[in-house]
Amino acid sequence: MKRPVSLRGRLVLGLAVLATTAVLAAEIVGFVVMRSWLMDGLDEQLAHFSTPRKAYQDAVSDKGFPDRFTTPGALPSDFRVFFYDSDGRLLSASLGDYQQPTKPELASTVDGLGLSVGQLATVSADTGGGRWRVVLREGPDDMKAVVALPLATIDGATSKILYVDGALLALTVTGVVLLGRWVVRLGLLPLTRMERTAQDITDGDLDLRLPHTDTRTETGRLGRVLNTMLERLQGALRERETSEARLRRFVADAGHELRTPLTAIQGFAELALRHEQQSPAGRREANRLIAQNAERMGLLVDDLQLLAKLDQEPSYGPSHGRESVDLLSLAADAVSAAALGDSGRPIDLGPLRGSKDEEELELVEALGDPHRLRQVVENLLSNARTHTPPGTPVHVRVGTARVAPDTGGADRPGRTSASPPLPHGTPVGILEVADAGPGLAPEDAQRVFERFYRVDRSRSRAHDQGGSGLGLAIAAAIAQGHGGRLELDTAPGEGCTFRLVLPGSGRA
């Protein structure tokens, strides 16, 4: 028989084999016990049968047995008694029912029997296929007698038992197969449903989940594990799709940004080549614009290379110049440089609001790359000067705190960030750049850290000086690489507060 391949078939086959083995073993034990009990009863009858002394005398007499001892019913049950004389020869006279169709096949001499006195044995019938149970008895004057009982009753009973056992075995196996298929199908119903759901998921319905998740059953635990795996796979697919969409948008934006200065360079270069008789002033202007756009394109390429490097190695370890950085000195240098570059805009440096002493600046230390952190601060100050009206004050604040919604490092309504929140209560160093400009709308604030994203140019005081939209993305990547984050608190008409939050050894 070909071995079934399916789990259902193997389970039904296993149940059938186990049931067959169990029923067959029970029938064999019952048959052996029954036959042994019947044989023991017959042997007990033979053991308790006593041949009268006079029967030995009548067996050797010329007259033989009286008729009353040779008619049917003369002896109890089906006993037959055969006699051997003192010389060990079998006598023709015997006691019992002579109308029985068979008698035991006995040797003509006692020695030929091969039995000792009191020994039980089974011998064949003289005709047919019957059997007899015999025992040798000792009589008077060295005579012997063989007491016999037919085994026809026991053989008939055991044959019927075998027929009944065979029919019962066949019925049991058939019932086990039929009921086993139903029970197995019912037991595997959760797996069948999971199979159908999995097929639907394979066909493209990724939002489906396996229905059976009862942890008390093996199938339920399997369903829960598979659902968790599906959630992670779907999340990974979504992240991949988001990453691919971001990459396509990034490539398109980069191409757009590079096309503008490249087109300008090409146009002015062609202009200079076509008009060789152009005045020196016109040539100088064309060369100046070519150099300006080339510089702009070079800065953009540098920013793209920096972002690629930050994406490849986002964490700042010892190999990246990780050291203790004084955020207060860093802020002071950046404020001084910004004040010299824009003398008409008030820029001040002060302590963090909510600190122990709001009138005194404190030393704030954080671990990181001082050059990259200075780049972040300069970028934030440049962003504040570019996107606020002239004369708008800018406040730079430095201090220490613990991560909380009110201080920084944690999410709250009106706050956006490209990095996950830090563990609540973590000691951090904070550097804020706040302006009193027009602020940002919620939809702009949500995208302000995206690459190449630029808010409406009307916020800028100099439309031709707008950046490429990479500054805040670079600053956020640097902050996240230092184990912190860059976040924004803003609302229309309330200005913008960019907050650099870094874990470190800040001292209050």
Image (tube, rainbow, N blue to C red):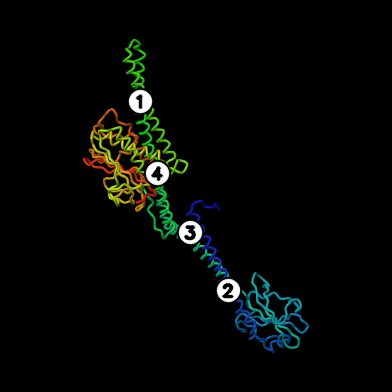
Residue found at the far left of this picture: 493
Q: Quadrant of residue 444?
A: top left
C-alpha separation, residue under disc 2 versus residue under disc 3: 29 Å
Describe the element under mark 4 as helix, strand or loop: strand
Q: Which residue is mark 3?
A: 177
Q: Which residue is mark 2?
A: 33
Name the amino acid, label 3. Val
In the picture provided, is 420 more to the left or to the right than 52? left
C-alpha separation, residue under disc 1 versus residue under disc 2: 101 Å
Name the amino acid, label 4. Val
Nearer the viewer's eye, disc 1 or disc 2? 1
Q: Position of residue 272 (x, y in %)?
A: 35, 15
C-alpha separation, residue under disc 3 versus residue under disc 1: 76 Å
Q: Position of residue 31 (x, y in %)?
A: 57, 71
For marks 4 and 3, the one nearer the N-term is: 3
**Which residue is more in the foreground, 242 or 41?**
242
For marks 4 and 1, the one nearer the N-term is: 1
Label 3 neighbour load within 10 Å: few <14, some 14-19, many 20+: some
Q: Which residue is mark 4?
A: 325
Asked if the residue at tag 2 contacts the one at tag 1, i.e. Cβ–Cβ closer than 8 Å, the answer is: no
